[in-house]
Image: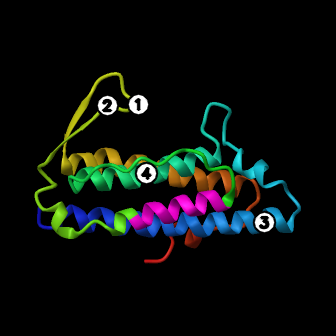
Amino acid sequence: MSNSLYTTSIPVFRQMLGGLSAVLAKAEAHAGAKKIDPNALLQARLYPDMFALLRQVQVASDFAKSVSARLAAAPVPAFEDTEQTFADLQARIAKTLAFIDSLSPAQFEGADTREIVTQAGTPKEKRFSGQSYLLNYGLPHFFFHVTTAYAILRHNGVEVGKKDYIGTY
């Protein structure tokens, strides 16, 4: 692949996690300014059968770190899902960014054809090439959870827009 999977993944995860961090900061400020219990936002969801904001952020973080690790042939770090506050979520995003920033482009050499096997959340294992794993599985799931976190907050009156979602690039 002429464009390494490093440049197709790490900068995208970095940008979108940065945007998510900024959106969460605005949500926390919104809760304070409007005298809203932060848990009302942290536990908000778009529909009863969907994850709450807290879990959306955790899963977005999980996809960023696990996809990056697997493509780099590195161990996937385990993060406890114990976050309860906006500060906890910010710390998780920072920890995720620190991990993905620790990966070098050299670790991604050959990642496009590397076999990736997943089992979590599925009844059967799934096998992908690295390229398919990133483009058809990892990025779509990551964007779903980042987008849903944004949508939960926007739906609940937090004044965020497209620039906030996109982050700095």
Q: From the top left corner, tell me how far across and down residue 11 is, in percent.
A: 35, 69
Residue 6 found in image quarter: bottom left
Identify which amino acid the numbered label 3 is placed on. Answer: His
Q: From the top left corner, tell me how far across and down residue 45 is, in percent.
A: 67, 42
125 displayed left or right of 53? left
Identify which amino acid the numbered label 1 is placed on. Answer: Gly
39 displayed left or right of 165? right
For residue 121, which numbered disc appears in the image? 1
Q: Is residue 93 magenta?
A: yes
Q: Is residue 132 magenta?
A: no
Q: Residues within 10 Å of mark 2 (few under 14, many from 20)?
A: few
48 displayed left or right of 169? right
Question: Which dot, 1 or 4, sits closer to the camera?
Answer: 1
Tags 2 and 3 touching, CB below 8 Å:
no
For residue 106, which numbered disc appears in the image? none
Q: Residues within 10 Å of mark 4 (few under 14, many from 20)?
A: many
**Which residue has dot 4 on it?**
142
Give the residue displayed 80% in from the left and 62% down from the top. Answer: 31
Q: CA distance from mark 2 to mark 4?
A: 17 Å
Helix, strand or loop for the magenta stretch, by majority: helix
Give the residue displayed 57% in from the left and 66% down from the top. Answer: 21
Q: From the top left corner, tell me how far across and down residue 129 is, in percent.
A: 17, 44
For residue 119, which numbered disc appears in the image? 2
